[in-house]
């Protein structure tokens, strides 16, 4: 019983981190056992084709990754029935700024924050990583001085290249982008457009038989990052569906890969000898 208590992750629900479209935006905060100080953190972004879903989809990851010592924040963002590109990205950036501005209270290291998302959430996670501190994508919510840089990114089967004539998730892409969008707008909403040597370390998790987001979406961007000189890894799950991590076994395997990846790139800062 004592061992189990030590492993318990605490959860705070419905925490307001900002406003968007005239309403409160909320998140859930998962704190590791023993309420650590200066812990690494992950912002979790749910999927649902930019139209469906909510932050509770990633509750399992909040607990599983929280047990590994990471503070997890599962955030909401305005969906396509309420907002259009780039407003959902503004909401993600507001959540990131809130985490950094409240780092002491949350017990996190503001210099060790990663972003992770599933499907459309993976798309937004990659966009967040690719547009760090770019004024045209900040939206103005939250503490503007907090910054939106991230130390690493994880994408579960996230779209990386949106096109006005593509067939991938066509209806949902059109709703997310809105009417009368140009090719340059689609390029601006495509994470692969921001592949460069300055892109943070990125982990792609993808099925090689994905029926909704073809594996080429992940492989092409991973190759672009490696070619540019940015750290990137790709793990393909064989003959699995789009949301393969709905399988608890594969979800736990994914957590193991995520924590190993982040421990490589978000290791504990060296302590300074004050003597």
Image (tube, helix red, strand yellow):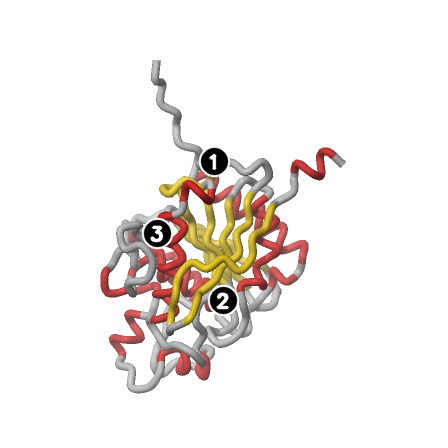
Asked which quadrant contains residue 23, the reply is: bottom left
Task: Please tell me which of labels 3 and 2 falls first in the chain.
Answer: 2
Residue at x 57% of width, y 59% of height: 58
Q: Are marks 2 and 1 in contact (CB under 8 Å)?
A: no
Q: Which mark is residue 97?
A: none
Q: Which mark is residue 37?
A: 1
Where, quadrant-wise, is the C terminus in this rendering? top left
Assign a secondary structure to mark 2.
loop
Q: Is residue 131 left or right of residue 232?
A: left
| Residue farthest right in this picture | 1
Mark 3 — residue?
Answer: 226
Assign a secondary structure to mark 1.
loop
Where, quadrant-wise, is the N terminus in this rendering? top right
Asked which quadrant contains residue 32, the reply is: top right
Q: Nearer the viewer, residue 241 or 101?
A: 101
Q: Which mark is residue 119?
A: 2
- Residue 269 in picture, x, y percent from top left: 40, 32
- Residue 178 in picture, x, y percent from top left: 35, 82
Assign a secondary structure to mark 3.
helix
């Amino acid at each position: 019983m004592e061992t189990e208590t030590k492993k318990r992750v605490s959860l705070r629900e419905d925490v307001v981190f900002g406003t968007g479209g005239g309403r409160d935006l909320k998140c859930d905060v998962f704190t590791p056992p023993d309420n650590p100080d200066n812990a690494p953190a992950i912002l979790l972004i749910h999927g649902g084709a930019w139209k469906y879903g909510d932050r509770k989809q990633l509750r399992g990851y909040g607990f599983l990754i929280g047990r590994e010592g990471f503070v997890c924040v599962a955030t909401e963002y305005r969906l396509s029935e309420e907002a259009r590109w780039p407003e959902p990205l503004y909401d993600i950036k507001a959540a990131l700024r809130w985490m950094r501005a409240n780092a002491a209270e949350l017990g996190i290291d503001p210099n060790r924050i990663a972003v992770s998302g599933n499907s459309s959430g993976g798309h937004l996670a990659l966009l967040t990583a690719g547009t760090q501190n770019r004024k045209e994508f900040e939206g103005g919510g939250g503490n503007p001085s907090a910054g939106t840089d991230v130390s690493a990114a994880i994408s579960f089967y996230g779209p990386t290249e949106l096109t006005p004539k593509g067939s991938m998730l066509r209806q949902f892409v059109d709703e997310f982008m809105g009417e009368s969008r140009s090719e340059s707008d689609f390029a601006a909403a495509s994470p692969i457009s921001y592949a460069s040597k300055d892109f943070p370390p990125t982990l792609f998790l993808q099925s090689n038989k994905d029926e909704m987001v073809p594996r080429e979406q992940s492989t092409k961007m991973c190759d672009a990052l490696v070619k540019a000189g940015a750290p990137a890894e790709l793990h393909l799950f064989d003959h699995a569906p789009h949301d393969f991590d709905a399988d608890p076994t594969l979800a736990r395997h994914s957590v193991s890969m995520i924590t190993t990846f982040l421990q490589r790139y978000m290791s504990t800062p060296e302590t300074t000898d004050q003597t």
